[in-house]
Image: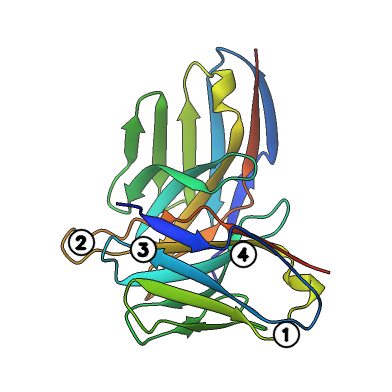
Amino acid sequence: KQEVTQIPAALSVPEGENLVLNCSFTDSAIYNLQWFRQDPGKGLTSLLLIQSSQREQTSGRLNASLDKSSGRSTLYIAASQPGDSATYLCAVRSGSARQLTFGSGTQLTVLP
Amino acid sequence: NAGVTQTPKFRVLKTGQSMTLLCAQDMNHEYMYWYRQDPGMGLRLIHYSVGEGTTAKGEVPDGYNVSRLKKQNFLLGLESAAPSQTSVYFCASSYSVQRSSYEQYFGPGTRLTVT
């Protein structure tokens, strides 16, 4: 059974800092990995999707890496802003129906 | 193009009552999913469907039933609600044959409270 772990559970940083969120998964037989952002009381917004054959994906100030063999992914956020404050969820896609298995998330607070 | 929509947005039920949550997508996706999210946790898969007329159990299916009579709709039913089913429910869809992509798109969620 696939299990996804995210560390840390919560993170508070001053504005302008670069930061890294970590995600690990137990079964390396994945199709892809997706990072989401969730604002309080809201739905999920997809940030980046990395296919199993890729090593990283970039979108603006966000960079996600994938090391499938070691079961790890990182989300790098450059020059953090208060508007980046949210919960970040990592999810891996596996199984016959390509369903997602989610981590518990990292709650990020960027202080002005 | 509305993406994934969910009805209703909020609902309060008494223990033992029944209800149906509706999910609709307009992206011609083959796969649809129902997840629940409890405080401090990630999403857990309840049921999913890989095509019209098909359904399958996910990680936490007990107490729920689903139906997919039309490709664009996926219904989640609670026959006899229990306080343990108080949660936020998210619907998602994925897989476009034309785009050959499995990226999942999520609805805004339904907040359900069972008293």
Near mark 3 (Cα within 10 A), the count class, few <14, some 14-19 or many ≥20, is many
Crowding at mark 1 (Cα within 10 Å: few <14, some 14-19, many 20+): some
Above or below, B5 relative to B77? above
C-beta proximity under 8 Å, tags 1 and 4: no
Q: Earlier in the sequence, mark 1 or mark 2?
A: 1
Return the disc, 1 or 4, that comes first in the chain's sequence: 4
> Which amino acid type is shown beneath numbered disc 3?
Gln
Tell us which disc is closer to us: 4 or 3: 3
SS label for mark 4:
strand
Task: Please state if A10 lies on the left or on the right of A82 as rendered.
Answer: right
| Residue type, mark 2 in image | Ser
Q: Name the residue under label 1.
A: B80
Q: How far apart are marks 1 and 3 (CA)?
A: 27 Å
Front residue of B33/A49: it is: B33
Q: In this view, does B27 lie to the left or right of B110?
A: left
The chain containing the residue under callout 2 comes to B
The amino acid beneath tag 4 is Arg
Between the residue at mark 4 and the residue at mark 3, the CA separation in whole angstroms equals: 18 Å
Q: Residue at x 46, y 44 (%)?
A: A45
Q: Which of marks 3 and 2 is in front?
A: 3
- Chain for mark 3? B
Image depth: mark 4 or mark 2 in front: 4
Q: Secondary structure under badge 1?
A: loop
Query: Which label sits on residue B112?
Result: none
Determine which residue is flagged by label 3.
Answer: B25
Query: Residue B36 has which mark?
Result: 4
